[in-house]
């Protein structure tokens, strides 16, 4: 009996038809989509909100209990909501405790309703810089750190008791810029002057009634009263003229149906692809540590595969990284440059793309950043921990026998000698010059014009644009549109790619046990909790051996969140 090959399209077509039918059934009554943002439920993305703006849904209702993300993530979401509002969609927000992040997002809405016991606690932007130098000195420990770049501050957490003047200058400018962005967003969204927004925020915490009086909200309502308002806005009149109930559909359900339909449709159409490669985490040498990170080995292999894949018309590098190993950053930079020679590549910087995170994107054809992106930090740092003092207290001594004055340069038992320090500093300076050379070539600007904005100093995306370190303000969607222009085809489809670490099952089980407190894992985490930020703990975990071996690091240690 003859056999006939079964075309994959015959299998995918029914899936597409079913998901398209489900999407039509969801949208046919022109519902209001309700998104609960509580830290546990997936938060709407800018891409999903843009799709909502093109859908048949009449509006979106956001229940903001806990908004997560840095300034760039929230800016991308807020901009997408603004585009939806400009397309004629109604946006309403229900919020309890309204902090910086919640107010920043909510300010775009047509209506903001606070719960009676809610408060506006948008207290403004602050950077908490922690320093453990005195603690480590008491224990007999120290970090012997050198930096190429006046503003390069990675080692300060472990070597100083307070911020250096350069660190304080750069951080103050960063906080001032982000605070101004927050005030301007609130003023624009609530249709008030920046001075009025600034004065209102200065009075926080505010009760719900005070927030309404100052123009930061439109009403004080319980949940059942909010539902009555939604019926009033979206209810379909009944035959007798009475308003019906609003058709409310979960945003997550609608987005899931749309996502499956789009996947099936993209496969059926077989259009060329623009790959959005998500690079998230610390930049590491080799194959990484088994934790989510930007490991040079797998990332370079992925970039080479994209270069050789004829189905890929262009690439967007979605970078969210504070940096890490300088040598790994340069290795990835080389692979990006080779990819750029084959097809258009545009970088889209997320919440942070600083130091090594900036390095790996600087070879792209163009760079996009949000106004609130933390970027720059073009500089190099290195050094070693010195445990000799602690060993002395424990009665342990060390003696070196060598014929070379440099043989024990990276010994953990003693600091650098003057000659070793000079040699080590020269090594960092060479790498710093290489870093600035890469930026100079990528930005097509003279070395001296770039170097004045380098020196380890960090900038917001808005400030980086003014200094020529990025090309445009925007997010992944804007970068994708730009790649389509560079490829000369608007018909290319988006494919998202994430590089996940390969971790053996036994290793995962051991890590899970350690995370629950076995072998003192919980105690170690608790001891670090008060001294370093989550980003710094990740750096110690991923980059500890790199630092202790004196290798150059391109890393930005601080976290500034809404």
Image (tube, rainbow, N blue to C red):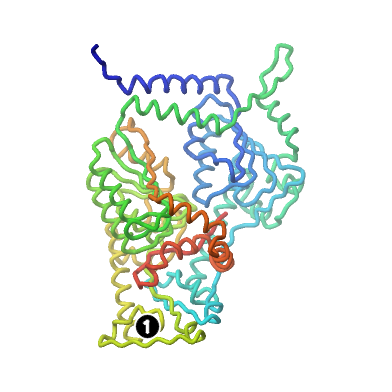
Residue 543 or 116: which is nearer the viewer? 543
User: Which quadrant holds residue 385?
Assistant: bottom left
Q: How many marks?
A: 1
Local secondary structure at mark 1: loop
Image: 6 above or below 77: above
Mark 1 crowdedness (10 Å alpha carbons): few <14, some 14-19, many ≥20: many
Side of 545 where 87 appears, left or right: right
Residue 547 or 54: which is nearer the viewer? 547
The residue drawn where x is 52% and y is 73% is: 163
Q: Position of residue 356 (x, y in %)?
A: 37, 60
Q: Position of residue 232 (x, y in %)?
A: 70, 26
Instruction: Report which residue position mark 1 lands on.
Output: 416
Residue 17 or 102: which is nearer the viewer? 17
The residue drawn where x is 40% and y is 60% is: 323
Q: Position of residue 336 (x, y in %)?
A: 28, 51
Image: 223 above or below 298: above
Q: Quadrant of the N terminus?
A: top left
Side of 415 where 209 appears, left or right: right
Image: 196 above or below 532: above
Q: Position of residue 526 (x, y in %)?
A: 58, 64
């Amino acid at each position: 009996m003859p056999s006939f090959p079964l075309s994959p399209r015959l299998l995918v077509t029914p899936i597409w038809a079913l998901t398209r039918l489900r999407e039509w059934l969801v949208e046919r009554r022109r519902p209001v989509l309700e998104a609960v943002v509580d830290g546990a439920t997936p938060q709407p993305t800018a891409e999903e909100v843009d799709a909502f703006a093109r859908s048949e849904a009449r509006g979106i209702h956001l229940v903001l209990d806990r908004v997560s993300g840095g300034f760039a993530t929230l800016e991308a979401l807020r901009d997408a909501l603004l585009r939806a509002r400009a397309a004629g969609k109604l946006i309403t927000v229900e919020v309890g405790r309204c902090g910086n992040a919640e107010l920043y997002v909510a300010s775009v809405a047509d209506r903001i309703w606070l719960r009676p016991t809610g408060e506006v606690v948008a207290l403004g932007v602050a950077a908490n810089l922690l320093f453990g130098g005195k603690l480590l000195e008491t224990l007999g420990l120290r970090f012997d750190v050198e930096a190429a770049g006046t503003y390069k501050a990675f080692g300060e957490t472990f070597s100083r008791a307070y911020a250096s003047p350069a660190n304080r200058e750069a951080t103050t400018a960063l906080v001032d810029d982000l605070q101004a962005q927050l005030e301007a967003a609130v003023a624009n969204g609530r249709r008030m002057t920046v001075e009025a927004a600034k004065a209102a925020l200065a009075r926080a915490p505010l009760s719900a009634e005070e927030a309404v009086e100052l123009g930061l909200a439109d009403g004080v309502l319980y949940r059942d009263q909010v539902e009555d308002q939604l019926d009033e806005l979206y209810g379909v009149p009944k035959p007798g003229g009475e308003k019906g109930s609003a058709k409310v559909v979960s945003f997550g359900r609608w987005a899931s149906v749309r996502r499956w339909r789009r996947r099936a449709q993209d496969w059926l159409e077989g259009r060329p692809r623009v790959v959005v490669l998500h690079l998230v985490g610390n930049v590491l040498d080799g194959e990484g540590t088994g934790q989510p990170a930007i490991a040079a080995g797998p990332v370079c292999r992925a970039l080479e595969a994209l270069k050789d894949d004829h189905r890929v018309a262009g690439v967007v590098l979605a970078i969210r990284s504070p940096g890490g190993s300088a040598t790994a950053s340069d290795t990835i930079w080389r692979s990006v440059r080779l990819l750029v020679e084959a097809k258009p590549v545009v970088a889209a910087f997320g919440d942070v793309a600083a130091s090594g995170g900036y390095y790996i994107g600087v070879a792209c054809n163009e760079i996009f950043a949000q106004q609130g992106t933390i970027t720059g930090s073009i500089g190099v740092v290195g050094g070693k921990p010195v445990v000799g003092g602690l060993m002395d207290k424990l009665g342990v001594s060390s003696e070196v026998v060598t014929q070379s004055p440099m043989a024990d340069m990276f010994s953990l038992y003693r600091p650098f000698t003057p000659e070793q320090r000079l040699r080590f500093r020269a090594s960092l300076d060479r790498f710093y010059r290489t870093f600035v050379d890469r930026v100079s070539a990528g930005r097509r600007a003279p070395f001296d014009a770039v170097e004045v904005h380098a020196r380890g100093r960090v900038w917001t995306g808005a400030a980086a644009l003014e200094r020529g370190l990025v090309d445009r303000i925007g997010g992944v969607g804007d970068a994708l549109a730009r790649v389509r222009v560079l490829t000369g085809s608007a018909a290319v489809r988006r494919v998202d790619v994430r590089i996940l670490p390969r971790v053996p099952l036994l290793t995962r089980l051991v890590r899970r046990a350690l995370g629950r407190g076995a072998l003192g894992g919980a105690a170690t985490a608790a001891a670090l909790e008060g001294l370093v930020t989550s980003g710094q703990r990740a750096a110690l975990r991923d980059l500890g051996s790199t630092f202790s071996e004196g290798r150059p690091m391109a890393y930005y240690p601080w976290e500034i969140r809404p």
